[in-house]
Amino acid sequence: MSSGPELGVCYYPEHWSEDLWITDAQNMHKNGIRWVRIAEFAWSRIEPNPGKYEWEWLDKAVDILGSNGLKIVMCTPTPTPPKWLVDQMPDMVAIDENGRPRNFGSRRHYSFSHLGYQKESQRITEAVAKRYGQNKFVQAWQTDNEYGCHETTYSWCSSSLTQFRKWLEKKYKSIDELNKSWGNVFWSMEYRSFSEIELPNLTVTEANPSHNFDFRKFSSDQVKNFNSQQVKIINEYSPERPVSHNYMGHFVEFDHREVSKDLEIAAWNSYPLGNLQNMQIIAREDKKLVRDCFNMGDPDFQSYHHDLYRGMGRLWIMEQQPGPVNWAKYNPIPKAGAVRMWTWEAFAHDAEVVSYFRWRQAPFAQEQMHAGLMYRDNTPAVGSREALQVAQEIQKIKLPRTQKSEIALLHDYEACWMTELDGQTEDFHYTRLMLDFYKAIRVNGGSLDVVGKEADFKGYKLVIIPSFVHLSSEIFNKIALSGAKILAGPRTGIKTPDFQIPKNLSLEGLGYQVTRVDALPRELPIEVEWKGIKGHLSVWREHGNSSGVSEGNSKDGMPVITSGNKGSYLCGWPDSNLLSAIMKDQMTAAGLKSISLPEYLRVRQRGDLLFFTNYGEQKAVIPDFYKGDIILGSRKMGQADVTILRSEG
Ligand code: GAL
């Protein structure tokens, strides 16, 4: 465990002439950087020809960086298999859904299921781990880089097919079981043996959702398998060093909780502006937010991911946006102060390290337009000044241990896949729904934990389940037994784990029996009134019979919320005003304090410290509700400002 939060940077010694390395290392250290991540794309320099390793340059880089006071995160270089390897095994490249190969010439051109590539990945991992596992400067590891990036989780190749059939056979044992579970009698899709099964692409119309769902679970397992093969080797050669992987924002194609079980550090790459521009669903629906926050990012997106991933391991931000990126629809310059604010916000959410991507802007190849902490001419860019400021500030503030929050938000990858595969309305977007509920707590001053179904729910006062399609009554009862107040959202408990409609369309104890569903475009909301507040439900509206206490009404005659002996049920997807009023009410009923914060002001509690961030263009004043001494910043906050207050309780 590090003693306090630290800063890091991603560095590519192979991009620069050796005579720059020493001054780079010295400048990093001067700039308050203590960690440096290297080598994740360096395979062609480590092994330029099959079996002929060239370590001298990397040894030298490690030595220079380390002896200048930097701790190294060493990576396995498997996201970028070199050309000679692809030529040796041309069938290792992934195949896209339309049957086209994902060719050499960028990165991530491999199929997780290719046994030959798995062997190669283990071989190169072993070579690197053997060489640096006990190196005193190498203090942590990263496997590969951004699993699944550029739509590479799924491969529709023959290796996937072979492995998929084996996976199915292991799961179902008999083909009759599979046929029954998938409901293959529908459209004469029955199989006589596992060897008849194909991958669920290139079908005339949609493939059977159960087929697709199993393919997603299989593909997720392939990522887990690939990662754990590497982790096992690293742990053998470098047992005392923690292993991480760097996940992405807004990315749900594999079960990160499962992959994280093999890792100590759950890192992610935070690109607030790129993510705001690229999250189409927000871009389409929240024009005001995209306009107001275009140079700072969504005020909750980063926090949501910090909370999501810190639930899976020690939290690091392995790549932090330092200036404009190159890959989003639009790539604005961050507002002055934003890089500092994002960094502090990560620390507020328990990050141990925030590491900027990258040290110096690359003058060649794909990411020339991507900022670094240094400009191409080696003068400091804006981000580096802000990083330095944080480096100085963290020296002065001792961060307390974080505590379990009083509110939990239940998140589940399989539930997400099910809603995607059986959409019913194009606008039902799982992460968007999560974020809406998360925001609705945050605008009322709440701090939350984002948890999976295996969490220990004891100690929570309020558990929110925005949507969990196949929530079993066992898990639901476990949550109910914790004594927490429960609010479940639309589309909870309406499928069996093998993707069929259960006998009862609703979970017992929420006061509602769903009978049918109005699945709508967001532009056609339904007017409702709840406790005197006029609002809307949109996208998903459940019709049914109330058997408990009902609240609210609407033109369609259905309630807004129902309650039974185990919790409450929200029978649709409310607009943000209504949802935030409902959350306030839930918080009060759970015995929690709340306050309506100014529009873009947010707060997160860590121990007795409260961290405020202002994502708004307007100045924001911290309400008197929050009493205590200011230890950083001031009560009057400018745009992209951070204030830390020691709470009086
Ligand atoms: C990340 C990736 C980095 C770099 C960066 C640019 O997704 O891990 O290698 O490409 O984006 O923003």
Image (tube, rainbow, N blue to C red):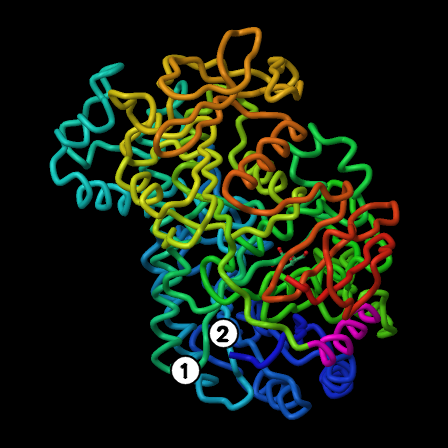
Asked if 619 appears above or below 513 in the picture, the reply is: below
280 falls in the magenta region: no
Question: How many residues crowd mark 2 within 10 Å: few (<14), some (14–19), many (20+)?
Answer: many
Question: How many residues crowd mark 1 within 10 Å: few (<14), some (14–19), many (20+)?
Answer: many
Q: Dot 1 corresponds to which residue? A: 238
Q: Are marks 1 and 2 in contact (CB under 8 Å)?
A: yes
Q: Main secondary structure of the magenta part?
A: helix
Amino acid under label 1?
A: Ser
Left or right, 181 with respect to 130, comes to left
Q: Which residues are magenta?
A: 384-397
Q: Is residue 102 visible?
A: yes
Q: Dot 2 corresponds to which residue? A: 141
> For residue 42, which quarter of the picture?
bottom right
Mark number, residue 574: none
Amino acid under label 2?
A: Trp
Left or right, 454 with respect to 335, comes to left
Q: Residue at x 85, y 65 (%)?
A: 382
